[in-house]
Amino acid sequence: MNFKALAALVTGLLILMTTGRSVMAKDMETRTYCVGRFLVDVPAEFEVLNFGGSVRGIRIKHLGPGDEKHAEQFFSERVRKLKAGEFYKDTAKMLFRRVDQIGYLRTVSYLDDWTEFGFQPQEPWAEETFVSVDGVVFQLETAMDDESEDSSQADLLSVAKAIRPRELGDIPKGSGTCLKDAFFSLPAGNENIGATFIHPTERSILLRISTVVRDPGGRALDFSAIEGADGDPVSIAGLKGKELHLQNKQINLSAMVGRQPTRSAPGYKITLEYSDSRTEAGAAPVTLEDAEAIWETLIKNMNIKR
């Protein structure tokens, strides 16, 4: 080992001994993820724990490889189970309503089954379809009632037309929104998408990213959590709000930023959180200094996808 290398090693060890700061905080490798309409840099070692949400109120599930024939098989099996009284969500039995045609989509609708209680509400109901796009089958499901039926059907059709599969690390070009294994080339609208990342060895360390988008002219977003005096001003992805650093037995770093929708522009809300709930939060191998470095990387390298 030459003198320069030895000197660098000694300096690094001195820093570690005097500050407790690990290599992660100093030389952090990151990976860029597309979450909703945002790009965010996350430490490369963190793993995706959860990644989901809804687009235009529609929940999307990646079912795996398949063509139109496979999509039709999924659809037929759903209808069969509903008609046979064999389809449950969690422990709730679903009641077959009817099969419909929405544009080019074949849909099946169903209700929570209340018949054993002597009555049966007719709304709201769930509307479901299965589509194959680029060799991948997706399940799309949304809720409707008599008042929202027309708009919900239009949203279902637009999302089905816009969806395409993507790999987790793929950053699609152009404006749109990302789920874990899908991308939607759609104008900004009502969306609720979030992702949770977990440390590979310290499983009580989590990063949470929640994104909400509202249609131009849409209902107001809730920013009541940051309307008090607590927290410091922060800007993330060009959106202003507040952040809060709490350290007691646990470490919790959080922020909320955004803006309300206007008649001509969509509204955005981002909620970020770093939490370390270990018995010895802030201990090696992920120290408090590491946590702060991760947090700074997260908030400074999050941007609206263009």
Image (spheres, rainbow, N blue to C red):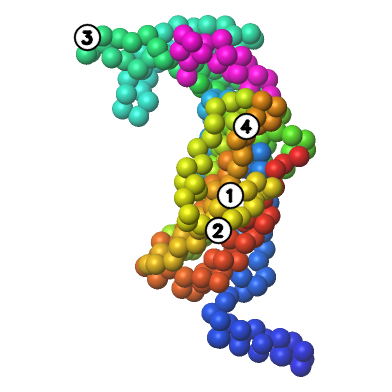
Contact (Cβ within 8 Å) of mark 3 with mark 2: no
Q: Give the mark nearer the N terminus: 2 vs 4.
A: 2
Q: Give the mark nearer the N terminus: 3 vs 1.
A: 3
* Disc nearest the viewer among 3 and 2: 2
Q: Which residue is mark 2?
A: 232
Q: Amino acid at mark 2?
A: Asp
Counting from the top left corner in percent of width and height, residue 42 is at 62, 55
Q: Amino acid at mark 3?
A: Gly
Q: Amino acid at mark 4?
A: Pro
Counting from the top left corner in percent of width and height, residue 51 is at 54, 42
The label shown at residue 261 is 4
Q: Which residue is mark 1?
A: 241
Instruction: State the SS at label 3.
Output: loop
Instruction: State the SS at label 1.
Output: strand
Q: Give the mark nearer the N terminus: 4 vs 3.
A: 3
| Region of the chain picked out in magenta, as a range | 143-164
Q: Give the mark nearer the N terminus: 1 vs 2.
A: 2
